[in-house]
Image (cartoon, rainbow, N blue to C red):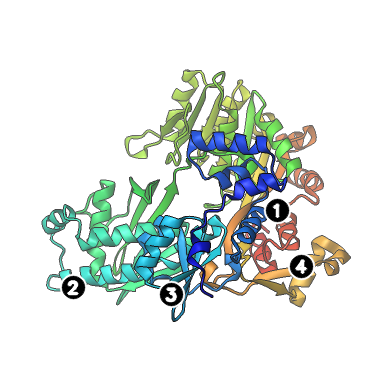
Amino acid sequence: MQESTIERRRKIRVEDILVQQGIITHEQLVTAVAELRNTGRKLSRILVDLKYIDENELLRFTAEQLKIPYLELTDYSVKPDVAKLLPETLARRFHVLLLENLDADVLLAMADPTDLMTLDELSRFLKKNIIRVLVKESTLVKAIDQCYRRTDEIKVLAEQLRYELADNDATDLNVLLAADKATDAPVVKLLKSVFEDAVQVRASDIHIEPQEQKLLIRFRIDGQLQPQTETDLKISAALVQKLKLMAGLDISEKRLPHDGRFHIKVRHRSVDVRISTMPTVYGESVVMRLLIQHTSGFSLEKQGMPAEMLERFRRLIQRSSGMVLLTGPTGSGKSTTLYAALSELNTSAKKIITVEDPVEYRLQGINQVQVNEKIDFSFARVLRSVLRQDPDIILIGEMRDQETAQIALRSAMTGHLVLSSLHTNSTITTPGRMIDMGVPPFMIGMSLLGVVAQRLVRLVCESCAEPYIPTPYEHIWLSLELGEDVNKYNFVTGHGCSQCHNTGYQGRIAIYELLEMTAELAAAVTQNNNQLFTDLAQQQLQGKTLRHNAILLAVAKRTSVTEAMWVSNQFE
């Protein structure tokens, strides 16, 4: 399978052949080249982004012209031990991945097989003949992230830190601070590796949990906790002290919970970290929520809301006054949907003020206020001041008490659009929850425009998806929504692979239900007639509930029946 030197070194201008064969026009190539000069992006990426050619079609055409294979990397079982024969720095620098290590050859996945400088340098390093394989760049980057995870490095660094602390159970803070100034300080390098690995695998939270005989580090990925590493309990105090210092917390107080935040840069990405500590019988437990700042901004189109529902939701948030609520448990994506709505409403003609605890993402052109309960700067107190700032739109991060809810509803009644979130299981139970908080029913009936409930559903990993036959119980559950049509559909599940950390799932998508407050629903709330309100709301939501939308994802083979049932059980 040797490639001739002449063939390998011949630089083929695929874009010229695309024009010659009429796949793209000369004018389109000229436009793409102009974009190349302005941005410096790859020409192939520009052609795809401008929709002049489908990406898969371009890749197969390129492979055919170069006379090399095109490989769907998601269908290939990548071997991390083989891949790591090439250092991570070279793999990321040249956008390549080592797939096979043969006697005289190596099989190399490349996003740009025409890059002769890369081939020359890697040939000198590997000292073997390179057999090129063309792969999609997005899947290549994901595969590199999977292969070069920090698990082994974290274990080694944790062991180094344990060794340094072995002779002294108490961590000397002065030594730790001095070591912090050195680039080889084990505690700093360990935390750096933990954060890099967490960002690399899209973790939303990092859990550092002292157990009786070990320290457990776990990541929450796609809503599920997954063990990252286990190490010696003795390093726990050093890690917690360093994290407290980073967040400006009191390191001398270990008997009480602490909450704080700090900002870091990981892999050229800006990350806000919200930290919470809790004293346990074996030491302080730490949970860190990672909030990666969005460089591309928020968009309602990207939230996954069905087109018909999106149109109705947009009509609600374009109103000049009234309240729109997002409901769901912690971690269901409410804040992301609210920020997407604000981004759409954010114009120079409107003044928008947010009251949040904490401010999760920074938005240009919007006045964001951070609540601070320690100095009695509460939601209610901030809201009273906000109304004197002449806002058009107010976002309240969460309605937690009667006073905040009543001020928010009065604001909605007096010419302001108010967006907020509330912890309820469904849209139907939302007015009842507000009444339980002590809000007068008439205020809800007069001010509430609509309620959106949402959840996040895990998507089946495309790399290991396989046919699935529902169990008898699942079949009955599906038939409640699909009727006899349930037998017409095929379902899938993920058996687990290296791409999804053997979970069978990769990524999540939001599902929604939207209840609009009609005159009849508002009257039922005002009369505090819960049964009438429930009956009317169920009629409006028929075929548009969270459960129905979860099942539609299973029917579309995007999630599993098991996941759809699990998510539905959270609100039924």
In this rendered view, identify the residue nearer to me: 65 or 98: 65
Q: Which circle marks residue 82 in the picture?
A: 3
Instruction: Decide which of tag 1 and tag 2 comes sooner along the chain.
Output: 2
Q: Is residue 543 above or below residue 143?
A: above
Instruction: Decide which of tag 2 and tag 4 comes sooner along the chain.
Output: 2
Q: Amino acid at mark 2?
A: Tyr
Q: Secondary structure at mark 3?
A: helix
In this rendered view, identify the residue nearer to me: 360 or 498: 498
3D distance between C-alphas at marks 4 and 1: 14 Å
Q: Quadrant of the C terminus?
A: bottom right
Q: Amino acid at mark 4?
A: Trp
Instruction: Decide which of tag 3 and tag 2 comes sooner along the chain.
Output: 3
Instruction: Decide which of tag 4 and tag 1 comes sooner along the chain.
Output: 4
Q: Which circle marks residue 204 in the picture?
A: none
Residue pointed to by mark 1: 546
Instruction: Answer left or right for 236 relative to 197.
Output: left
Asked if the residue under mark 1 is in contact with the one under mark 4, i.e. CB atoms within 8 Å, the reply is no
Q: Is residue 459 above or below residue 320?
A: below
Q: Secondary structure at mark 2?
A: helix
Q: Is residue 349 visible to us here?
A: yes
Q: Amino acid at mark 3?
A: Val
Q: x and y percent of residue 554 in the render?
A: 72, 62
